[in-house]
Image: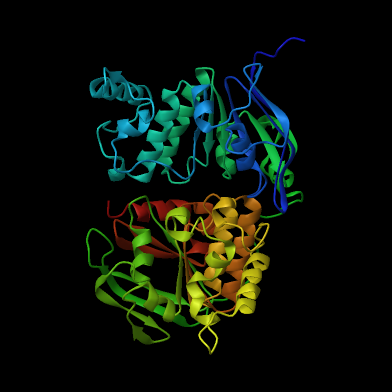
């Protein structure tokens, strides 16, 4: 039997079970040289589990893996890397206190006698950066870099292994449009060198622009693999969710009423940050916040929530002035905040679903005797799981073992348990599949219909245009304008976003 030399990686019939759940059921993936292969599926479909079986992080129960025509069974990610398979993770795992070049060559330093050859390490790193057109000083401290720069360092690290298979997990989730174009040029360069790239993304536009083939997993099973030319957006969504999704956004049914929140001249104490930010939020209104990277959109929510100290300005809720000196005050005053960096500031990864669901609302579970009511805690945890459609084996499952989308659902459910008046969401659908996005949009709309005031930051323009009533545009820490969503255009928003640059 002749070996297909075009096929670099062939994963066949992989099954993997955990207590209470079958994560993979006869799943397969075939990746060819000189190609970009999209791996798609809803959160919890088994994409990460499949790749962890490839990397030896999980031991597969059944199935086989061949790489460059030979059967392999890697026992660790180090072994996979050394054999030419690398991965750029969505959640970056870097040593922030060390230099860029240290992070690139960690565990395989070039040596000069008993010492690390710093000169060679710098030269080799600079050479890779030049080839990939990355403008970062190899001796810079990783902790001083932006998220997007740190992601470029990870891509360079994958490149440094001369990998034949490069797996990219949601690589554009923290990148600007310009940075995305740069990333795509790097991916195309890898493709030209004969690499096979596995590209995991929920952004359909990226998949159609970049990828050659698409494999879809659903509920741990292989659903199909097709050339991108044979697919359209509706076909991929149908394969992913097992049903036709007639619209990306639910039909808007909320009616904004009287003003519930009035913010006047809000300025953060430590500059550079927000200056003289003023806006109103109505009952039942969904207010979007748009802006380019560095516009200080997140700073608005952090100042409202008491994470950042304000130096001037006022916040009025229901006509009464209040002061959110810290998040505890903000929660007491009816505010809630779903943060942008889920893993860093949203979840307690090693703790269970129950703790992560209830941590913002612990006071509500105290009995008269001072103990916690286990029945109420169990009931509310189940409410989060049911209302948010969280896929989890049990209440006691560590949240870090869930997919990113299911983690996000738990975080949103946590804040809904506090019954907030003002719900603030910072990039709430980042890294979440199209089916789960629709569920979150519907939930936001349901809350608006219950007269909650909702503020949502999003870098996805179609998302802002699809679910908001008005959009506040930030530019360099200042309000550049507030527009009615139905009457505005993407061009108008982008022009406003550039006003104070």
Q: Quadrant of residue 100?
A: top left
442 sits to left or right of 419:
right
Q: Quadrant of residue 412?
A: bottom right
195 sits to left or right of 212:
left
- Residue farthest bottom in this picture: 368
What residue appears at the point 41 percent right and 78 percent down from the top-left corner? 261
| Viewer-side residue, 471 vs 207 | 207
**Residue 36 rendering spot, x and y as whole percentages:** 58, 28
**Residue 305 rendering spot, x and y as whole percentages:** 38, 71
Q: Quadrant of the N terminus?
A: top right
**Residue 249 rendering spot, x and y as whole percentages:** 63, 58
State whether residue 181 is above or below residue 482.
above
366 sits to left or right of 328:
right
Which of the colour schemes (rainbow, by chain, secondary structure, one colour) is used? rainbow
**Residue 346 rendering spot, x and y as whole percentages:** 47, 60
What residue appears at the point 55 percent right and 86 percent down from the top-left corner? 367
State whether residue 422 is above or below residue 118.
below
Q: Quadrant of residue 206?
A: top right
What residue appears at the point 35 percent right and 39 percent down from the top-left corner? 149
Q: How many marks?
A: 0
| Viewer-side residue, 481 vs 129 | 129
- Asked whether residue 32 is in view, the answer is yes
| Viewer-side residue, 488 vs 111 | 111
- Asked whether residue 466 is in view, the answer is no
- Residue farthest top in this picture: 2
């Amino acid at each position: 039997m002749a070996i297909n030399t075009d096929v670099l990686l062939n994963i066949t019939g992989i099954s993997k079970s955990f207590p209470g759940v079958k994560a993979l059921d006869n799943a397969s993936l075939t990746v060819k040289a000189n190609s970009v292969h999209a791996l798609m599926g809803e959160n919890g479909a088994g994409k990460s589990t499949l790749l962890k079986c490839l990397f030896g992080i999980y031991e597969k129960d059944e199935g086989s893996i061949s790489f460059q025509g030979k059967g392999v069974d890697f026992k660790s990610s180090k072994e996979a890397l050394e054999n030419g398979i690398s991965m750029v993770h969505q959640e970056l795992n870097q040593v922030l206190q060390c230099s860029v070049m240290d992070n690139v060559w960690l565990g395989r330093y070039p040596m000069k006698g008993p010492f690390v050859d710093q000169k060679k390490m710098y030269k080799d790193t600079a050479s890779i950066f030049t080839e990939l057109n990355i403008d970062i000083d190899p001796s810079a401290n990783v902790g001083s870099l932006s998220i997007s720069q740190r992601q470029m360092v990870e891509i360079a690290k994958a490149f440094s292994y001369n990998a034949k298979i490069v797996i990219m997990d949601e690589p554009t989730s923290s990148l600007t449009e310009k940075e995305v174009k740069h990333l795509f040029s790097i991916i195309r360069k890898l493709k030209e060198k004969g690499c096979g790239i596995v590209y995991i993304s929920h952004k359909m536009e990226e998949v159609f622009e970049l990828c050659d083939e698409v494999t879809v997993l659903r509920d741990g099973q292989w659903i199909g693999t097709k050339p991108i030319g044979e697919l359209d957006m509706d076909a991929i969504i149908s394969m992913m969710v097992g049903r036709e999704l007639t619209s990306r956004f639910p039909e808007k049914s909320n009616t904004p009423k009287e003003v519930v929140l009035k913010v006047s001249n809000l300025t953060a104490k430590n500059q550079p940050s927000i200056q003289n930010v003023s806006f109103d939020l109505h009952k039942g209104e969904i207010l979007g916040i748009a802006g380019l990277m560095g516009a200080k959109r997140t700073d608005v929510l952090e100042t409202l929530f008491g994470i950042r100290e304000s130096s001037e300005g006022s916040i009025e809720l229901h006509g009464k002035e209040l002061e959110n000196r810290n998040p505890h005050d903000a929660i007491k005053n009816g505010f809630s905040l779903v943060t942008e960096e889920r893993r860093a500031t949203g979840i307690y990864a090693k703790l269970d679903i129950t703790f992560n669901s209830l941590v913002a609302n612990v006071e509500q579970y105290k009995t008269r005797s001072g103990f916690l009511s286990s029945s109420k805690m169990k009931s509310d945890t189940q409410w989060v799981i049911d209302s948010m459609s969280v896929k989890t084996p049990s209440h006691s499952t560590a949240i870090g073992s869930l997919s990113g989308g299911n983690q996000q659902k738990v975080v949103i459910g946590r804040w809904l348990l506090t019954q907030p008046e003002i719900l603030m969401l910072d990039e709430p659908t980042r890294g979440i599949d199209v089916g789960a996005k629709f569920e979150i949009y519907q939930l936001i709309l349901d809350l608006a219909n219950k007269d909650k005031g909702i503020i949502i930051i999003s870098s996805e323009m179609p998302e802002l245009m699809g679910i908001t009533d008005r959009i506040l545009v930030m530019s360099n820490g200042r309000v550049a304008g507030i527009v009615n969503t139905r009457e505005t255009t993407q061009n108008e928003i982008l022009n406003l976003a550039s006003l104070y640059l």
